[in-house]
Amino acid sequence: MAERNDLMYTLGDFISRGHFVLDDRSDETLLQQIHDYAAIIPFDTTGHSWADLLFMPMTPGNTALTPAALAQLFDNTDSADGKLFPQQVFLLAFLQLLKTPRTLLNTFPAAHRELYYRDLLGGSEKAAQADQVALSLTLKPTVRECFIPAGTLFDGGQDSAGTPLHYALDQSLLVNRSTFSDLCWVQPDPTDTIDKVNDRQLFRVAYDQQKSAWPTQGYRLFDPETSQQPVVNGRLVASSLLAMTAGDRTITLTSASNINSASISVAQVSSGGQWLDLTLPDPATDTTTLVLRLSEDAPAIVRRWNWMVSRWIHR
């Protein structure tokens, strides 16, 4: 008997590691199925069935013994008063004998997984990975900023078993009143396959504080389904040699490769807080030298970002 109990304990532990069993019927369900099957088998010629015999009342004149009541006696033998009929005792004994083969049957799915994934494929479980969540923190109106050190615990509610959950901050955080004024992205154009060189870019203004509120459901960055605009390419030159204050001014740029002036939509030079338009070659040129001119009526070329700057933008 001890060996059988040890076997049942081992098999039960093996089954508990899986999530699927072949036969998960309760004792009450089995007794009900036996009752339903026996009810269609005649016992005699007077209209009685085998269910009437197996579940007859313990006291004449009472209602028949139900599968639920018999299952309760089976689960709690201390409540039995010794008045069960022999056929009912036989039925419960048969139910007890079924426990071992049912347990063996239920170990088959887990044993098959062990054989296939571990022994045949050589798989093993990955180490446990900590769950992660994103926190949204809001300062009180009277607080300018708040430093939260790494490891601070936050209440995460409870799991399905009612065990309290806590999430630890993975790195220190300084919460302040800074906000995003705008959010943009630039990414390669997936349709640009000319010469197998992906040099065209697309951009999108995902968020602008002046035009809309931050979406409550968040924003999916680099979403190819959203409308995007092509990035206008250009060049920027910063040099003190551009410091020319008056008169007709000529800027000559020499490049290692040809510069097609027809591809330039605008050329400008800095003048403090503004940009001055430069005159492009007319007719257009396509050489390594680009000549740009600024008329004598234009203001002086002055510093921008501590340098004199010239820029031109391609079409």
Image (cartoon, rainbow, N blue to C red):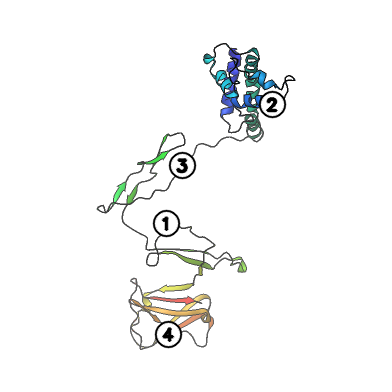
Q: Which residue lies furthest to the right in this view?
A: 45
**Nearer-N-terminus badge (1/2):** 2
Question: Hey, which quadrant is residue 26 in on the image?
Answer: top right
Tag in front: 1 or 4: 1
User: Label 2 amino acid?
Assistant: Tyr
Number of numbered markers: 4
Tag in front: 1 or 3: 1
Decide: few, some or many residues near mark 2? Use Cα within 10 Å; few <14, some 14-19, many ≥20: few
Asked if the residues shown at circle 3 and circle 2 are in contact, with their CB atoms under 8 angstroms apart, the answer is: no
Q: Relative to 89, does residue 119 appear above or below in the rendering?
A: below
**Nearer-N-terminus badge (3/2):** 2
> Residue 293 has which mark?
4
Q: Relative to 279, does residue 39 appear above or below in the rendering?
A: above
Tag in front: 1 or 2: 2
Q: Distance between the residues labelled 1 and 2?
A: 59 Å
**Nearer-N-terminus badge (2/4):** 2
| Residue that mark 3 sits on | 131
Residue 180, percent across and down?
37, 60
Q: Which of 133 and 203 is in front in this view?
A: 133
| Residue that mark 1 sits on | 216
